[in-house]
Amino acid sequence: MEIFRGRRLWIEQRNVSLPNGIERQKVIVHPSNAVAILPINGKQCKLIRQYRYAIDEYIFEAPAGALEKGENPLAAAGRELIEETGFAAQKIEHRGFIFTTPGYTDEKIFLYEARGLTPSQEFDMDDDEVIEVVDIPVSDLNRMILEGSLVDAKTICLIHRCLGC
């Protein structure tokens, strides 16, 4: 049974049969799949400091965003990188994917590493995003994760996939 349908997600309640034979009623959130990109420029990476209304805080995170209907993840990564940072990449490499919270959602985020950055104004930033681009030394990322100043899960996974931190 559909509970809600919005522009980028829908929520359903349905009966599921678990592998052990038990049946339960569960709520599943179906957002658009997304991309996250770690832009690396020499010994620096470009993170964004973004206001997130759900937690009423600014947090550091990798540029990221939802795939448009029918959009290829690699194309979305290039678009989101430009929209959120104002930079395009000469090289974007796929670094796998993650499921964000598979206990209640099927959201998948495709991970990318971007290098060879050059300024670009091909796409404009979304007007509902409050973003500041911040250059952070790659050598500081692990410390930021350990001390808790970088707490965004997709960004932590992306840093690990790209840099092995």
Image (cartoon, grey):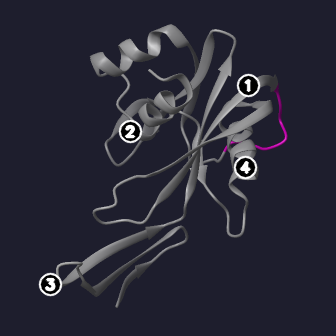
Of callouts 3 and 1, the N-terminal one: 3
List the residue tagged with mark 4: 74
Q: Residues within 10 Å of mark 2 (few under 14, many from 20)?
A: few
Of circles 4 and 3, the one toward us is: 3
Question: What amino acid does circle 1 point to?
Answer: Arg
Question: What amino acid does circle 3 point to?
Answer: Ile
Gap between marks 4 and 3 measured at Cα: 39 Å
Gap between marks 2 and 4 measured at Cα: 21 Å
Residue 140 lies in the magenta stretch:
no
> Is any part of residue 61 visible from this angle?
no
Of callouts 1 and 4, the N-terminal one: 4
List the residue tagged with mark 3: 22
Gap between marks 3 and 2 measured at Cα: 31 Å
Q: Is residue 63 above or below residue 19?
A: above
List the residue tagged with mark 2: 153
Q: Is residue 57 left or right of residue 72?
A: left
Position of residue 86 measured from the top left corner of the image (x, y, whole percent): 74, 31
List the residue tagged with mark 1: 115
Depth order, front residue of 89/96:
96
> Is any part of residue 115 visible from this angle?
yes
Position of residue 69 measured from the top left corner of the image (x, y, whole percent): 68, 69
Of callouts 2 and 4, the N-terminal one: 4
Which residues make up the magenta segment? 119-125
Q: Residue at x 47, y 34 (%)?
A: 155
